[in-house]
Image: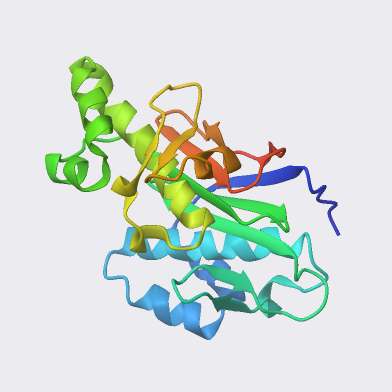
Amino acid sequence: MMPLPPSQVHLWCCRVDLGATEAARRRGILSDAERDRADRFHDAKARIAFIVARNWLRRVLALYTPVPPPQLRFGETAFGKPFLANDGDGSRLAFNLSHSGELAIVAVADGISVGVDIERIRPISADLLAGCLAPRELAILSALAPTLRQESFIRCWTRKEACLKAIGIGLNGSPASFEVSFDPFGARLLTVGSDPIEAELWQLADLEPAPGYCGTLAARHRGWSPIWMARP
């Protein structure tokens, strides 16, 4: 099995924009539930992306456990965050999956609950801004030059989503309830409500998986380093 030091978080990124024939081949190691979920996608591109991302997740996790990819079993927390449900080795293995556009990424850690989010940089709507930014963040974004706002918001959004995914609540939580940095080279959690200590417990890392994308890796744990194992 691949070694995973507790001070490292491994990152595995792949492309999901494959042809229908290749996607059908990769569908083979998915569970019945995953295949049923894939079949519910009406859009062929979205269906292929889901199949390839889930195939990638299984293949990556199998590198760290003695269980073959088709035999990996997943459970979910009350908020829908998946975890490995196989008995024995791998019980400490923590992971998170994100995909956007043509890319999917898997983060893997030993005993550290991690959240990862990548996003293709694209136009954004005013409704989305109002729903996920705290008042001070809205003011900072509004003060930026118009040419910088789109990427700045997407980067900010990945930082918030990675934090929410790290604690296992994802979009069930309110992204406007905490503040993150806008610094393009310094991802940080700044404030969490009125708690003066919580933000200091977190570590965030900026990710640049490919041109035209940005992302964030987050954990309520300090002292780890992100290690790229595969990039497209």
The location of residue 229, given as percent across then percent down, is 70, 41
The location of residue 169, given as percent across then percent down, is 43, 63
Compare residues 3 and 25 and report the one nearer the observer.
3
Q: Name the residue located 20 percent from the left edge and 40 percent from the top edge.
A: 129
Query: Can residue 18 be seen in the rendering of this structure?
Result: no
The answer to whether 73 is drawn above or below residue 22 in the figure is below
Q: Which residue is farthest top?
A: 145
Q: Which residue is farthest left?
A: 126
How many numbered dots are placed on residues in this image? Answer: 0
Task: Look at the image and tell me in which quarter the N terminus lies.
Answer: bottom right
- Viewed as shown, does residue 62 lie left or right of 193? right
Q: Which residue is farthest bottom?
A: 32
The location of residue 22, given as percent across then percent down, is 52, 61
Q: Name the residue located 65 percent from the left edge and 46 percent from the top edge.
A: 221
Query: Can residue 112 be seen in the rendering of this structure?
Result: yes
Compare residues 199 and 68 and report the one nearer the observer.
199
- Viewed as shown, does residue 38 lie left or right of 176? right
The answer to whether 5 is drawn above or below residue 71 in the figure is above
Q: Residue 124: which quarter of the image?
A: top left
Which of the colour schemes (rainbow, by chain, secondary structure, one colour) is used?
rainbow
Q: Residue 112: which quarter of the image?
A: bottom right
Compare residues 231 and 18 and report the one nearer the observer.
231
Q: Name the residue located 59 percent from the left edge and 43 percent from the top edge.
A: 201
Task: Look at the image and tell me in which quarter the C terminus lies.
Answer: top right
The answer to whether 167 is drawn above or below residue 208 in the figure is below
The location of residue 80, given as percent across then percent down, is 46, 72
Q: Name the residue located 32 percent from the left edge and 71 percent from the top edge.
A: 41
